[in-house]
Image (cartoon, rainbow, N blue to C red):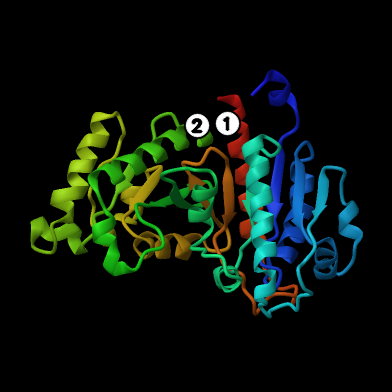
Amino acid sequence: MSSAGRTSPLSIAITTGEPAGVGPELTVAALAEAAERWPSVRFTVLGDRELMAERAGSSAWLSMGAAIDIEHHALSVPVTAGTLNAANGRYVLGLLDTAIDGAVSGRFDAIVTAPLQKSTINDAGVPFTGHTEYLAERTHTPRVVMMLAGMGDRPLRVALATTHLPLKDVSAALTVDGIVDTLSIINRDLKALFGLQKPRILVTGLNPHAGENGYLGREEIDVITPALLQARALGIDAPGPYPADTLFQPRYLKDADCVLAMFHDQGLPVLKFATFGEGINITLGLPIIRTSVDHGTALDLAGTGRADPGSLIVAIDTAVAMARHRRAA
């Protein structure tokens, strides 16, 4: 990036996600706080202007600050809060495409995504597994890492070796090279985007009790331990494999910067129990910065004014911090 780009205001894009869900109203609420907290940051909201005004209860929020731009993308069809319509599936995907293209081109320093509904996009005729996989495909990134984080005084970060897979497919998806690549991505991005000089990444086993020396499974012996030996040879601080049922306690986590879990529901229930409402989703390994909320579309809360913007606020704060670290690198 040129020196002119480095001195220009940070620019953050926010996609408003599924229009029938809480994304539009959470964006309104979160930006009201973010605009005060980050007066030098330019925020661009991607979504339907009239929908956001409706969810805000008025159009007054549109003039809350000169650092907020509303990039209008019209809904495909009118929407009722809480009621999904596949006709808006491509609208949702269009918001994401605009954000990704803008980040790749340098227009945006980071993107923050409100929750979307996978089923709506699939029902619109577009195969879609999730934000993480779609971001990897659109940026031609061979491997990305999903990391959820609770960003408090003592951040708890949990990354995944596999993401949205049936449990029966997890073992076959774990390879030595894959785990080494995943640890390398985590190690690199924790340095570049979080300012950690020597990240310490604790690694779980796959099986109960980390396999009990092979009596409860050999993945720890045949795959995970060889991968950790290779990672350590590369200078990555990655001890393990630890039994997942005992790893998530203060005496282990106090010196850890991240935990690498082997599958989605091994690490994320703990993270969400500890931080839900203030946790976020971060995609590591991309050429762009992307953060998101740690929850879904909450259709039952859409339009009620009761949805909590806490996770989206943290996602915005973290995107700003990560973009600043990248610029300073």
Viewer-closest of 280 and 82: 82
For the N terminus, the quadrant is top right
Q: Quadrant of the C terminus?
A: top right
Q: What's the CA distance linking mark 2 and mark 1?
A: 6 Å
User: In the rendering, at what x and y percent does residue 228 appear?
Assistant: 23, 41
Residue type at mark 1? Arg
Question: Between 321 and 5, which is closer to the camera in this rendering?
Answer: 5
Q: Are marks 2 and 1 in contact (CB under 8 Å)?
A: yes
* Disc sitting over residue 326 in the figure: 1
Q: Amino acid at mark 2?
A: Ala
Corner quadrant of residue 313: bottom right
Q: Is residue 215 visible?
A: yes
What residue is rendered at 50% in x and 54% in y? 132
Q: Does residue 53 sit above or below 84 in this rendering?
A: above
Q: Is residue 71 above or below residue 50?
A: above
Dot 2 falls on a residue whose secondary structure is helix
- Please tell me the numbered disc located at residue 196: none
Nearer to us in this view, 131 or 292: 131
Residue ID at (66%, 77%): 84
Q: Earlier in the sequence, mark 2 or mark 1?
A: 2
**Image position, residue 159 (x, y; %):** 40, 51
- Residue 99: percent from left, percent from top: 67, 48
- On the rendered structure, is 256 left or right of 34? left
